[in-house]
Every structure is written in structure tokens, then in C-alpha cells.
Image: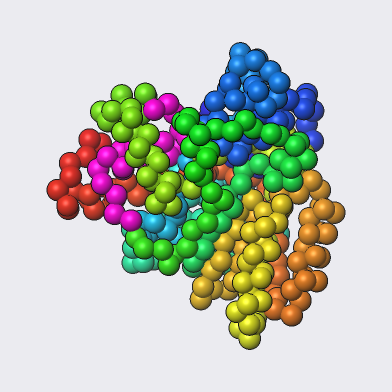
């Protein structure tokens, strides 16, 4: 798969008839929840053989419905800053815009990058080695855009949760019952609903943990044997390391990336500014509402920023999204000071272990005497 085919949303694909039946949707739903679930287990859940499930998955990949597999890694766990950058451009030519897109989609410190329609043209989640380094990266982005930049806002993230790549509502409607799994390589029995905050203690990973994390970060369904061969770590030890990383809240989930536009879903990002006079319990209620919503794909809380919350919603159509926003604004009209939303036209990049992080993490390990095999 090429890089530009790895996104979750592509409005140009919306509504295309690619002949997905109920079994295809159930398979996608399971892989979206945990792409390490074995084909034999999926087969039992959808009443098909392992061979039939594998064939269907290959067909879904050929149709560009099933895009890739990623590991959701706690973005705060290494102590690096995590920011959302909102960019509004002036009226520019397609050539100039494409040049900016290519620059951002290949940026070594960007986690997620989406093109949007509405208040902003680009929505970017990114990290950096330090606050000073982040400032340097922002200057570079501004220089790259140049005089075509109309507006740039930075949100300082303090919490991050959900990380869904398949609609929760779709999962519940399909009524999938997975057989109980205790001792397999999906780690399903110990995974929790993703949740991370900047207030968690920083984790210092050792050499073996980093080697495993590097291999599994953008190939979440890689086998224990292949990780063992690539890292030189015994297979049983690989499993133990992954188990420990999950328990330390370093690894949050294993997600299959599906083009939701083919499933007739739209993606929206909403921005909420909460009144400074709002009581803490009401702000916590708002956060819990977003976390529990079956429409929330990703959500984050920010501090000292233009907006207090931003949330990435998945809905079947604009009317459904409008009903969701109305419900939010009705329930929390006493604390919402400002609201804005964008339609996600296309996302170009999604990785929770951007390559730019490898060098500072390696150096942190080397300082304590470990030698990496990169």
C-alpha cells in the first residue's frame, strides 16, 4: 500500500458501491478493534472458516478498504510535548497546496495530518524532542507555507482518549460476539479503552522494549516470530515485553486502519472552548460525555489554548452529526463558550511512533549504557 492510501477518511470514496456484505463488515469491525485477533477466532465470530476469513481480508486490502495496521502508543509516555496545529491558508493554487501537503505528510514528527473543510484547512497532531524543538518545527512549517499562511493556532494537549478507527455504533449494531481469549497473541484480555494524560509518570524504556516497539508500531499485526527474528529477542520474551508495555500503559491498542468513506461514514473534527468560570465537575462531565459517545473516534483535552477540547467524530451523514452537536450543546450550554467544526476531507498520515522520535529515544537509552541495533 502506498502512503497516500493509508488514511481513514477520503471524501472522494464516499458512497462508492464496493459490494461489502455483512461478513465483510464484521471482519472489518473486529480488525478495527484489534487487528491482532487471529483469523480462526474471527472465523468463529462470523461463522466462516479461517481460509475464508483470510481470503476476505486479502480482497478488502485489494479494494483499498483495509489500509494498514498500527499500534496506538501513549503519546505522552516518553515525556515529549504533543500539540495540535490548526492551519488556515489564503487563496492559493493547487500546485502550492500540494507542495505543502507533501511536506507535511512526510514530516518526521507528525502523528496525524488531515485536510479539512470549514474553519481550518489542515489539522495536524505532532510531537517534538522538546518545547524548544517544537518552536523550531513551527518556524519551519511557517517558512514552508510562507506568505500563503493566513492563520496558525496551537493547542497544547494534556489528555488523549478513545483512538477508534471503526465506529463504535457500527460495532454495537453488528452484534459481534468474540470467543473468550486468554492466552493468545492478540492481548485482547488485558487491553483497556485507550486513555492517556500528560500527568502520567514518564516511562524509561530499555533497549529490548524499544526494539519491540519499533517493530510493532506501524505493523501492529506482526507475528511474535517475526519480531523475534528482527530483534534477536526470544519469542516468549517478545510476548512478555508487549504484555508489560500494555500494563505500563505504553501500548494502548492495536488498530486496523479502514477507509471509513467506503462504509458511508464521514469524519468531522469539533472544537470546544469551555468557559473559565465553568466548575470542574461540569468540565469533567463534558470530558466523560465525549469519551463515552459512540460517535467519538479520537478526542483530546488541551490546556492554555484557544480551545479546551477537540474531538474527532464519525457519523453517517451531516444530519446525524448535527444531531450529535445539538445534543452536546444542549447538555453543556452552561459551559460551552465557543464552538467550531470541520469536515475531514482526507487524512494522509497516522502513526503513533513517528520516525523523528527514534533518535531522542535511542539517545536516552544509550545514555544508560544500552546499545541499539538500528
Residue furthest to the bottom: 277
Whether residue 8 is visible: yes
Q: Is residue 291 left or right of residue 160?
A: right
Name the quarter where the C terminus is drawn: top left
The location of residue 79, given as percent across then percent down, is: 36, 60
The location of residue 241, given as percent across then percent down, is: 34, 40
189 or 312, which is in the foreground? 189
Task: Using the image, determine if residue 202 lies above or below residue 32.
Answer: below
Task: Using the image, determine if residue 202 lies above or below residue 307.
Answer: above
Q: How is the image coloured?
A: rainbow
Q: Residue at x 85, y 54 (%)?
A: 319
40 or 57, which is in the foreground? 40
Whether residue 91 is visible: no
Taking the magenta stretch, the answer to whether it contains residue 20 is no
Taking the magenta stretch, the answer to whether it contains residue 212 is yes
Magenta-highlighted residues: 203-224
Q: Residue at x 51, y 73 (%)?
A: 303
Task: Using the image, determine if residue 261 lies above or below residue 291.
Answer: above
Q: Residue at x 27, y 39 (%)?
A: 208
- Give residue 260's quadrant in the image: top right
Q: Residue at x 39, y 56 (%)?
A: 77
The location of residue 74, given as percent across then percent down, is: 45, 52
Amino acid at each position: 500500500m502506498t502512503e497516500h492510501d493509508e488514511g481513514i477518511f477520503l471524501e472522494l470514496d464516499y458512497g462508492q458501491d464496493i459490494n461489502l456484505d455483512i461478513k465483510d463488515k464484521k471482519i472489518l469491525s473486529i480488525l478495527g478493534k484489534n487487528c491482532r485477533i487471529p483469523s480462526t477466532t474471527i472465523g468463529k465470530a462470523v461463522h466462516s472458516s479461517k481460509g475464508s476469513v483470510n481470503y476476505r481480508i486479502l480482497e478488502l486490502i485489494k479494494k483499498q478498504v483495509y489500509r494498514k495496521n498500527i499500534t496506538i502508543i501513549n503519546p505522552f509516555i516518553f515525556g515529549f510535548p504533543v500539540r495540535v496545529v490548526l492551519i488556515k491558508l489564503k487563496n492559493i493554487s493547487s500546485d502550492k497546496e500540494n507542495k505543502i501537503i507533501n511536506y507535511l505528510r512526510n514530516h518526521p514528527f507528525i502523528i496525524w495530518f488531515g485536510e479539512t473543510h470549514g474553519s481550518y484547512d489542515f489539522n495536524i497532531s505532532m510531537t517534538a524532542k522538546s518545547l524548544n524543538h517544537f518552536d523550531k518545527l513551527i518556524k519551519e512549517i511557517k517558512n514552508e507555507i510562507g506568505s500563503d499562511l493566513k492563520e496558525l493556532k496551537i493547542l497544547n494537549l494534556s489528555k488523549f482518549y478513545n483512538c477508534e478507527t471503526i465506529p463504535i455504533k457500527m460495532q454495537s449494531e453488528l452484534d459481534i460476539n468474540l470467543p473468550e481469549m486468554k492466552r493468545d497473541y492478540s492481548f485482547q484480555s488485558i487491553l483497556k479503552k485507550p486513555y492517556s494524560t500528560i500527568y502520567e509518570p514518564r516511562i524509561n524504556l530499555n533497549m529490548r522494549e524499544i526494539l519491540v516497539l519499533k517493530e510493532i508500531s506501524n505493523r501492529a499485526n506482526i507475528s511474535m516470530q517475526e519480531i523475534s527474528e528482527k530483534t534477536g529477542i526470544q519469542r516468549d520474551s517478545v510476548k512478555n515485553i508487549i504484555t508489560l508495555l500494555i500494563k505500563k500503559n505504553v501500548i494502548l491498542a492495536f488498530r486496523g486502519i479502514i477507509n471509513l468513506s467506503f462504509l458511508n461514514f464521514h469524519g468531522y473534527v469539533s472544537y470546544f472552548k469551555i468557559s473559565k468560570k465553568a466548575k470542574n465537575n461540569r468540565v469533567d462531565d463534558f470530558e466523560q460525555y465525549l469519551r463515552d459517545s459512540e460517535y467519538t473516534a479520537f478526542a483530546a483535552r488541551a490546556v492554555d489554548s484557544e480551545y479546551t477540547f477537540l474531538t474527532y467524530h464519525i457519523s453517517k451523514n451531516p444530519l446525524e452529526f448535527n444531531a450529535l452537536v445539538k445534543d452536546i450543546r444542549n447538555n453543556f450550554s452552561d459551559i460551552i463558550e465557543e464552538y467550531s467544526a470541520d469536515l475531514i476531507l482526507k487524512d494522509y498520515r497516522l502513526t503513533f511512533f513517528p520516525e523523528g522520535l527514534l533518535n531522542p529515544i535511542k539517545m536516552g537509552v544509550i545514555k544508560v549504557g544500552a546499545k541499539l541495533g538500528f
